[in-house]
Amino acid sequence: MSNQAEGCDESDYVSLSAHLKEQAIDSDLARLIQLVADKSKVVQRAFVTHACLSDTDNIYGEKQMELDKYADQVFLDAMEKSALVKAFASEEQDDVLGIRKAKGEFGVTIDPLDGSSLIEANLAVGTIIGFFNEGNVMEKGKLMDASLIVLYGPITSLVYTAKKGVHMFVLNNKGEFELRKENIKIPTGKTYAMGGLRKDWTPQHTAFVENLEKEGYKNRFSGSFSADLQQILVNGGVFSYPALVNKPTGKLRLVFEGNPIALLAKQAGGLGTDGIRDLHEIEPEGLNHRVPIYVGGKKEIELAGKFLR
Ligand code: F6P
Ligand code: MN
């Protein structure tokens, strides 16, 4: 009798490339998703070799790790070489990069290493990517065609949506991404993850959190948006980086973080809002456009809306 936990049999599995074919994902988009998966293995290996602080700040004044820059370069090179990507917007770059020689029309947004300040403590960090079939990365999120998170944690996983459900893969011992969970739906669950200092929250947000706590929700905030969102996809609940009293737009960025992650949450039956508005209906005003973020189960996000309206 097999003693193996469900989903741990490595003898027979569906690979990411097979899954993309099975789902009939547009072949160019499938190629880009596969490229990101391949390059994420390069980034994953660099955690040991590149994990030292660099002496530069990114354009938002945050300290860049060597790894931030390295990951950015690895993904940019891959997108350039694919010849499918016309516009590349990275949290680590000052501006949208136009790729002149591209034959394809894709636009890509990327947060190359979300939560990178956690690397030294060996906590999970992630790569967050959004894809637009037509080059303009500054569109409303509702026009985004696919998004994914690669999470570098105890295991490396990749969760993608191409608007045909949300699917999770894990990097197996053969160096391949194998299907772990298909058609993920955010389950009922009592987890909350809230960024910012409690003393800086607005009274409305505080009231929402107190209501969750009264209902028995547990605080599980890791400091990495990508990891916290994956937690919600698996366990249910709500993530928020809210408006703060002295920072009404919060911390997270619509283009790089809010929109791609809201697409995953929505495809998994949940919602992504700024507390009131669907994130995907907000016109980005620039790469640095920040928004309060509420993402997770429908029930929780609707409840947040009642407190914040
Ligand atoms: O990208 C910014 C980020 O690292 C997110 O991953 C995370 O949710 C947030 O910052 C945490 O911010 P704070 O340290 O203010 O809680
Ligand atoms: Mn980030």
Image: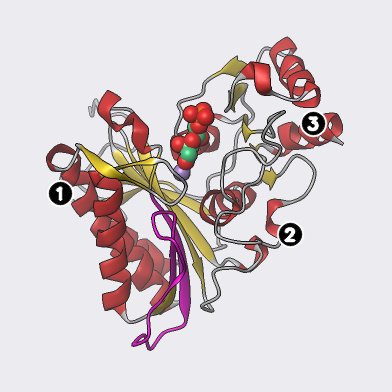
Q: x, y percentage for residue 161?
A: 50, 57
Type of amino acid at the residue the image marks with label 2: Glu
Please name the colour scheme applied to the rendered image. secondary structure
Is 102 in the magenta? Answer: yes
Q: Nearer the viewer, residue 209 or 23?
A: 209
- Is residue 207 toward the left or the right of residue 119 in the image? right
Q: Nearer the viewer, mark 2 or mark 3?
A: 2
Of the two numbered discs 2 and 3 on the same chain, state the one appearing first in sequence: 2
Q: Is residue 240 visible?
A: yes
Q: Quadrant of the C terminus?
A: top right
- Asked whether residue 171 appears in the rendered view, the answer is no
Mark in the foreground, 1 or 3:
3
Give the amino acid at mark 1.
Lys
Horizontally, residue 187 falls left or right of residue 74, namely: right
Q: Which residue is mark 1?
A: 174
Q: Is mark 2 within 8 Å of ligand 2?
A: no
The residues colored magenta run: 88-112
